[in-house]
Image (tube, coloured by chain):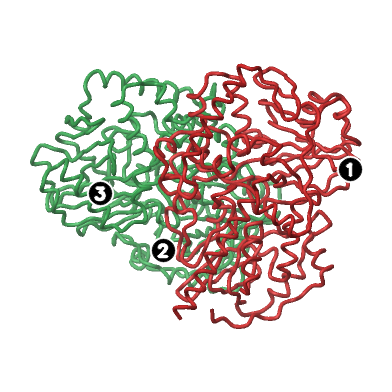
Chain colours: A green, B red
């Protein structure tokens, strides 16, 4: 490493930084101050490593590298950090309008929560859930669906088969699984249709899959689906609350983790600096953003994979990588929050959990602030439901959500004190949520390039993770990996110099 | 319309223009002269309409508008015109390494060929074709497959059913077809699998579909597929040579049509000017390219739909349009040409047409220059075959192609005098060919925005056509439509001013 000393950048007080990064406010402010100082220099600015994107993947990569003494700059297109994790306000409380839950085997995220002094709180599920599947309404304790025993046996058999198949798959190279091609060339829907003729079970599974992927089962490769299950332990872990992927919330919002990493990274983060082009040669990379040009030894691109090809690369990306991105659309989801004076459903013995296979929304649950106060419900317009409701006025969505709540939880549902939603496909720097899913025939053809560096450019982002792919935990792990890759190359390069 | 008079731009002699635009050379030259003169002005340059992309859609739109007195500028990222239509050299002859054939109902392309004084020549098919389907080799006259009568009946029944279904579909609004959703939520493969258990027929149909779409049948929506069939008349028209979509070649190359439109457009085309951002407000659009900024009343974006979202828009595109682009990947195809001293296969009573359902290539045919001389074969690595061979050295592809030719046409195939191929997924401004196909569940959800203007931005490109979508003829028609849309708005705006 033989770069110039970086220009002294603006150092904020902790209080200023908190404000700039939206910490504690729940809503991010536009930190033009941070950005303008660094961006006014006429010449190209220098760093050791440029990280593109300040979601969990980029923040983690940057933090790791900074801790190892590398000079890092993080270029973020938005006016906030966190990426697909975002804080919002509901009835005066900070809530997560993006990624939110954390589960017991999401150990990297749990470590971060602990390290930054934040607190988890268990997902509420005391009382009865209501489900409406294939036209039948049922109720059951906790997160139960109230399926009849016959359906339950059929359901369990399918889940067992899915877990068996996904257990055969090598996480770091799913394309090497036995019969990988045959499994990759069918959709999840194809497999489901051949696995059971039980309509109720199939309908429930389809709704669960829509909810988990924000994509319809007829849009995804079955091999990719098995990989995803394995990556997140197994089917029930992905779907469940208790002891599963939706076990805990973060009291202060999980976005607060991102905000605190950002404080550690301080002036290295340049907000509102969308990157347009990345060029490289034998001596380094040059990244051109709306806030100027940066030069460095390496770059880590940590934006959602389908959006990463909207940057122009010189030399260009391999065709395999571009094809991969083209066949890996973002999921479509709109997350909504509804606030009531109190969690009235609890008084009726209900826990606020709803399942349904009918539009506009597969699931709702209780995410009220712990320790009393208002009652909060959170739910999703997912997959084709989201495609129907994206881009429309929030009031229209609010109307159908309230109707659904009244239908399931009674007339008190008609009087919310607040409503908020996040239309992720409309968010220009995400263009969808939660993650990107592979279509059929992609994983076994071009899938193996997913983590392959493009010269001096390395890739992060939850889509590149092998463990908890599509989740915040996976994003962190991808940041760990990308930072380690760059560190290892930098050391090799130094040793051979 | 109340814009300043444009700066006087460099006017080339016809001879200079021919050279700059690669006309008559078969290969495009880099016309820095044309570009630099226009790009050196410090201030934003002005036009009435900015067209992004100089493929057939953009060229047609620009030409139509210019003929109606509009001041047009065409910004083209490449160093040549023609887009997915491109000229190459094989054994000293100009050949089309991109779009090539023209059929009798592709009337807009036929008109253009005539208008610019070019000539069609029929696809050669005198002699026997060889097919190898489901492990059985057969031979038949013309473009016949030599199927046995039972298979042929099964095949005809399926084609009839496909034509019946596609005939029910309204071309301008396929999402309104009866049962549209059910047809959209399955893949073409799903339909085929349910339509026949005849392996040979299914395998032949799958190969035909791969060849026609450069995509695998398990990747496409069945509704989209029906739309495409209807758009190109019917299944047999899309697949066939004689009286069908592959009826004629253009003697001078079909790329020559693009080159001649470009001559008519002269200095309005700015090559090597990739567009990065398009912003607009009540008074007009500003287009930022690597060759400077242009302002105009309207823009027509005529690049492949999935690539159109790699431009940054301010205000941003609707989520529906972005989702559409994400779920509409480009087809993957590598087109190859092999030259021999003479068309030796003809001496053996063969017409050079080969069909196969095995890798690496579904079809080959004879495209020798008319009037004697060398023998040319042209073929395709398509869909998953292309995914396997893209990005690799041409010599590796040449080897497997020659092996295939020797296997089918005999040992004389081992001695080509020239080989050329075009790896379309590797071409940065196309990232695939022929066109983009919709995945399941897209046409009936967000598909209807495909031609919806984004403020002052109108859309062209073959993907937006209703007639001959995916073909050169569709590209021309889309250019006609976009130009008419802009003209109509401009007139309205003048009338109300």
Quadrant hosting residue A407: top left
* Spot occupied by residue B419 in the image (x, y as percentages of width and height): 82, 39
Q: In this view, does A386 lie above or below B494?
A: above
* Spot occupied by residue B65 in the image (x, y as percentages of width and height): 61, 68
- Give the residue at x 14% y 51%: A414
* Spot occupied by residue B319 in the image (x, y as percentages of width and height): 42, 54
Whole-angstrom CA distance, mark 1 to mark 2, is: 65 Å
- The local secondary structure at tag 3 comes to loop
Side of A488 where A470 appears, left or right: left
State the quadrant of the N terminus of chain B.
Answer: bottom right
User: Could you say which is closer to the camera, residue A239 or residue B389?
Assistant: B389
Looking at the image, can residue A476 be seen?
Answer: no
Q: Which of marks 2 and 3 is nearer the N terminus?
A: 2
Of tags 1 and 2, which is closer to the observer? 1
In the picture of the structure, the residue carrying the numbered disc 3 is A251
In the picture of the structure, the residue carrying the numbered disc 1 is B371
Quadrant hosting residue B370: top right
- The local secondary structure at tag 2 comes to loop
Query: Which mark, by number, is residue A79?
Result: 2
Chain letter for mark 1: B
Residues at badges 2 and 3 in contact (C-beta under 8 Å)?
A: no
């Amino acid at each position: 490493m033989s770069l110039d000393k970086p220009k002294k950048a603006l150092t904020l007080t902790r209080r200023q930084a908190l404000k700039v990064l939206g910490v504690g406010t729940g809503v991010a402010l536009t930190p033009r101050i941070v950005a303008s100082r660094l961006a006014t220099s006429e010449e190209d600015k220098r760093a050791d490593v440029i990280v593109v994107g300040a979601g969990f993947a980029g923040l983690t990569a940057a933090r790791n590298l900074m801790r190892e003494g590398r000079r890092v700059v993080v270029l973020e297109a938005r006016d906030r950090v966190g990426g697909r994790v975002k804080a919002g306000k509901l009835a005066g409380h900070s809530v997560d309008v993006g990624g939110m839950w954390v589960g017991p085997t999401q150990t990297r995220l749990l470590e971060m929560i602990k390290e930054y002094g934040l607190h988890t709180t268990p997902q509420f599920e005391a009382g009865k859930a209501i489900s409406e599947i294939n036209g039948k309404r049922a109720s059951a304790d906790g997160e139960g669906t109230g399926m009849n025993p016959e359906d339950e046996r059929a359901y369990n058999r399918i889940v067992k088969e899915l877990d068996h198949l996904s257990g055969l798959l090598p996480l770091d190279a799913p394309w090497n699984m036995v019969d990988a091609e045959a499994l990759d060339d069918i959709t999840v829907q194809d497999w489901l249709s051949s696995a059971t003729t039980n309509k109720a079970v199939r309908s429930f599974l389809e709704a669960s899959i829509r909810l988990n992927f924000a994509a319809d089962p007829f849009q995804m490769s079955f091999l990719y689906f098995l990989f995803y299950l394995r990556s997140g332990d197994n089917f029930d872990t992905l779907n469940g609350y208790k002891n599963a992927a939706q076990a805990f919330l973060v009291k202060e919002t999980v976005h607060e983790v991102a905000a605190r990493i950002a404080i550690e990274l301080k002036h290295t983060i340049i907000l509102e600096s969308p990157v347009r082009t990345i060029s490289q040669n034998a001596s380094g990379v040059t990244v051109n953003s709306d806030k100027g040009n940066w030069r460095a030894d390496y770059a880590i691109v940590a934006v959602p994979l389908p959006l990463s090809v909207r940057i122009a690369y010189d030399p260009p990306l391999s065709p395999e990588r571009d094809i991969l991105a083209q066949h890996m659309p973002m999921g479509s989801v709109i997350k909504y929050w509804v606030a009531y004076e109190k969690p009235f459903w609890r008084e009726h013995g209900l826990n606020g959990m709803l399942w349904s296979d009918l539009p506009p929304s597969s699931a709702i649950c209780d995410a009220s602030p712990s320790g009393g106060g208002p009652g909060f419900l959170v739910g999703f317009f997912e997959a084709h439901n989201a495609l129907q409701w994206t881009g429309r006025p929030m009031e229209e969505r609010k109307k159908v959500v309230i109707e659904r709540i009244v239908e399931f939880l009674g007339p008190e549902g008609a009087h919310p004190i607040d409503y908020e939603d996040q239309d992720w496909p409309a968010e220009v720097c995400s263009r969808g949520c939660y993650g990107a899913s592979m279509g059929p025939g992609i994983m076994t053809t071009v899938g193996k390039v997913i983590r392959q560096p493009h010269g001096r450019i390395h890739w992060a982002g939850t889509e590149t993770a092998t463990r908890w792919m599509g989740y915040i935990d996976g994003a962190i792990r991808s940041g760990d990996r990308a930072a380690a890759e760059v560190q290892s190359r930098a050391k090799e390069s130094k040793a051979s110099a």
